[in-house]
Image: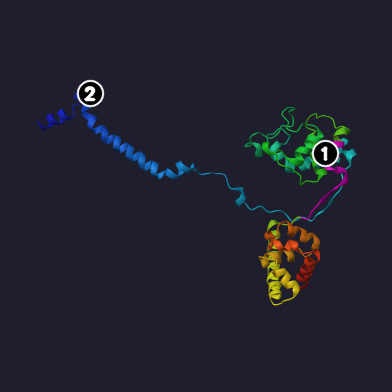
């Protein structure tokens, strides 16, 4: 009897004939579904509301880059005649420079199949193709590409290389296939745009950390001078001192400007202050002083620095 009763209660044939028997459970299922969705939405409210997502790209502003210390000088001028008539030595040097700077992306033979370029989109330039060049295939266009780069195509600029090295690379690339002939007009255009025949002045270069250290030390020295001059001014009641104090709203800022620009001419510095006196710690009344009065202040501060 007990087994028969269980069969009667779980009679699926009868359930199929009368599905409304489960209608009361529908509200329970619906309530559980809404509750689960509400809990999920509550936990994900901030990402959904603010469209937050985890980004896999590294913030470039957090990457510290360093530069190599280099002594500046004058890079020799380029012989314009050699651009039209490259020597074997220039082409061989161009191959060495190509292998060290270009081969990783453009491949051994300039087919754009280098290992470093496999993941690039668009792919590195295939020098054997004659179409699709952004700047063109003439020698002045090739030099423009090496000088400025093509950021949208992933092509870096090689302006740090001497002009002669860039030209040697171009001469070697031109050996892969037949390129447009070099004309005197193109050479003149190159010289007009980049002043190749005049040589290039290469400035000195120091590491960023060293440059930052120098700036910090200079800042600290000026700040200590400001405090020293301020003490001397407050201890002195001369006419020049009163003239300065009566025309400043921030004596530290005003002294910082005067001390850090001690090599500047008084008249030129006074003109700069007149353009925005409050920004430099002075009262607007400073503009009513004569050039001679400001020169007195400037010379006095310089003498006690």
Q: Position of residue 128 (x, y in %)?
A: 74, 29
Label 1, secondary structure: give it. helix
Q: Earlier in the sequence, mark 1 or mark 2?
A: 2
Q: How is the image coloured?
A: rainbow
Q: Residue at x 85, y 34 (%)?
A: 186
Total count of labels: 2
Q: To which quarter of the image does residue 43 belong?
A: top left
Horizontal arrangement in the rendering, residue 189 relative to residue 277 (left or right) = right
Residue 261 falls within the magenta-colored stretch: no
Q: To which quarter of the image does residue 274 belong?
A: bottom right
Q: Is residue 119 above or below residue 228?
A: above
Q: Residue furthest right?
A: 81
Q: To which quarter of the image does residue 136 belong?
A: top right
Q: Position of residue 45 (x, y in %)?
A: 42, 43
**Which residue does the numbered mark 1 point to in the structure image?**
91
Magenta part of the chain: 188-204
Q: Quadrant of the N terminus?
A: top left
Q: Quadrant of the C terminus?
A: bottom right
């Amino acid at each position: 009897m007990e087994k028969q009763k269980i069969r009667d209660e779980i009679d699926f044939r009868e359930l199929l004939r009368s599905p409304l028997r489960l209608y009361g459970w529908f509200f329970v299922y619906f309530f559980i579904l809404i509750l689960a969705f509400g809990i999920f939405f509550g936990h994900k409210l901030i990402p959904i509301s603010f469209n937050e997502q985890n980004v896999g790209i590294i913030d470039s502003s957090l990457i510290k880059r360093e530069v190599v210390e280099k002594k500046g000088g004058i890079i020799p001028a380029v012989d314009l005649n050699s651009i039209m008539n490259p020597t074997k030595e220039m082409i061989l040097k161009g191959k060495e420079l190509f292998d060290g700077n270009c081969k990783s992306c453009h491949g051994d033979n300039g087919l754009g199949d280098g290992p470093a370029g496999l993941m690039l989109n668009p792919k590195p330039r295939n020098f054997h193709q004659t179409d699709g060049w952004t700047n063109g295939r003439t020698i002045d266009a090739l030099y423009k590409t090496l000088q400025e780069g093509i950021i949208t195509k992933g092509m870096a600029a090689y302006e740090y290389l001497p002009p002669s090295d860039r030209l040697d690379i171009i001469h070697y690339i031109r050996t892969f296939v037949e390129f447009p002939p070099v004309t005197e007009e193109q050479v003149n255009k190159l010289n007009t745009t980049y002043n190749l025949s005049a040589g290039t002045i290469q400035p000195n270069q120091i590491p960023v950390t060293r440059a930052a250290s120098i700036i910090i030390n200079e800042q600290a020295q000026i700040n200590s001078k400001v405090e020293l001059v301020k003490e001397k001014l407050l201890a002195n009641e001369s006419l020049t001192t009163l003239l300065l104090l009566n025309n400043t709203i921030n004596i530290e800022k005003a002294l910082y400007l005067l001390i850090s620009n001690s090599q500047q001419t008084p008249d030129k510095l006074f003109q700069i202050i007149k353009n925005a006196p409050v920004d430099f710690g002075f009262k607007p009344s400073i503009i009513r002083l004569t050039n001679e009065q400001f020169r007195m202040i400037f010379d006095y501060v310089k003498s006690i620095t």
